[in-house]
Image (cartoon, rainbow, N blue to C red):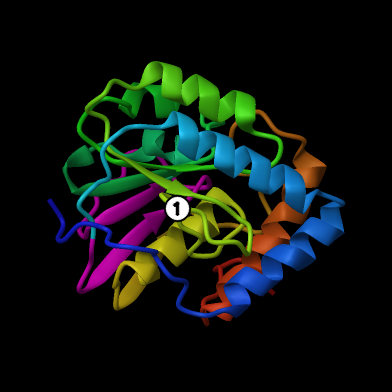
Amino acid sequence: MWGIAVDGAMKPVNHDLILIQDEIRESFDWSLEADYESAKSLVSQCNNPTPLLSFKSKVTVVGAAASPGIVPDYPTIVADGAIGAISDLSKVALIVTDGDGTPHLEKALNKGIPICLHAHGDNQESWTRILSIIDENQEVLLTHQTPFEIDGMHNPGGFTDGDRAVCIAFALGATEVELVGFSINDVGQWSGVTDEKRKLIKLKWMSKVLQILSMRVNDEE
């Protein structure tokens, strides 16, 4: 639909996008082993086809703070539950999710829109639920957040679904990324059930990831 198949490893455009994942793990006292085991388990259980994806120009990435009723002008990658903000799905190239975008994510599954399903140490229940919902024709791209090579998976960088979507856009060839619905000061309405204080800390890390890509969120000081 959008170009050639993802062939081999989808590489980050800047290695610092991988290095910062170690800093984030340390900050939250998360286990690299847990991230790795979740990733290995996901790739062993997912047999869905890989989507055809590449970009050659501008891409829009929609985050959880988006206003409803968006009609994209460019090929669009959507972060998880923010798919609920999209009125016209025809330009949605990919939904990036770690499985917690209920209930809006579920409504977009099995509709011909590829998903990027992400594994981390504490979301095995979430991605297991997504695998139980999707049919055999749902195209799935798999990502992880470890420094290891895992066959059948990719690590383009990123932490939250939003900044990971931006990393993916650039890794797949986008020449420019337009951010819609990104905030570091407010938890977006399309976020899943979350601890607001913890989420705001995560959004600060999202900002740091985007800065590696020379991008800023509008409400950054």
Residue 135 percent across, percent down from the top left: 29, 20
Question: In the image, what residue occupies the spot 48% across and 64% down?
Answer: 156
Residues rendered magenta in the picture: 54-78
Residue 175 appears in which quarter of the rendering?
A: bottom left
The quadrant the C terminus occupies is bottom right
Residue 122 percent across, percent down from the top left: 71, 35
Q: Is residue 158 left or right of residue 172?
A: right
Question: In the image, what residue occupies the spot 43% across and 26% down?
Answer: 104
Q: Is residue 2 above or below residue 11?
A: above
Residue 117 percent across, percent down from the top left: 45, 40
How packed is label 1: few (under 14 Cα within 10 Å), some, or many (20 or more)? Answer: few
User: Magenta part mainly helix, strand or loop?
Assistant: loop
Could you tell me the amino acid type at mark 1? Answer: Asp
Residue in the foreground of this view, choosing between 107 and 153: 153
Residue 183 appears in which quarter of the rendering?
A: bottom right
Q: Is residue 187 left or right of residue 89?
A: right
Residue 115 percent across, percent down from the top left: 35, 40
Magenta includes 129?
no
Q: Which residue is mark 1?
A: 151
Badge count: 1
Q: Is there any visible trace of residue 140 in the rendered image?
A: yes
Q: Is residue 27 above or below residue 213?
A: above
Q: Is residue 25 above or below residue 217?
A: above
Residue in the foreground of this view, choosing between 211 and 28: 28
Q: Is residue 27 left or right of residue 163?
A: right
Q: Could you tell me which secondary element the residue under label 1 belongs to?
A: loop
Question: In the image, what residue occupies the spot 75% across and 48% down?
Answer: 33
Magenta includes 68?
yes
Question: In the image, what residue occupies the spot 31% across and 67% down?
Answer: 172
Residue in the foreground of this view, choosing between 152 and 144: 152
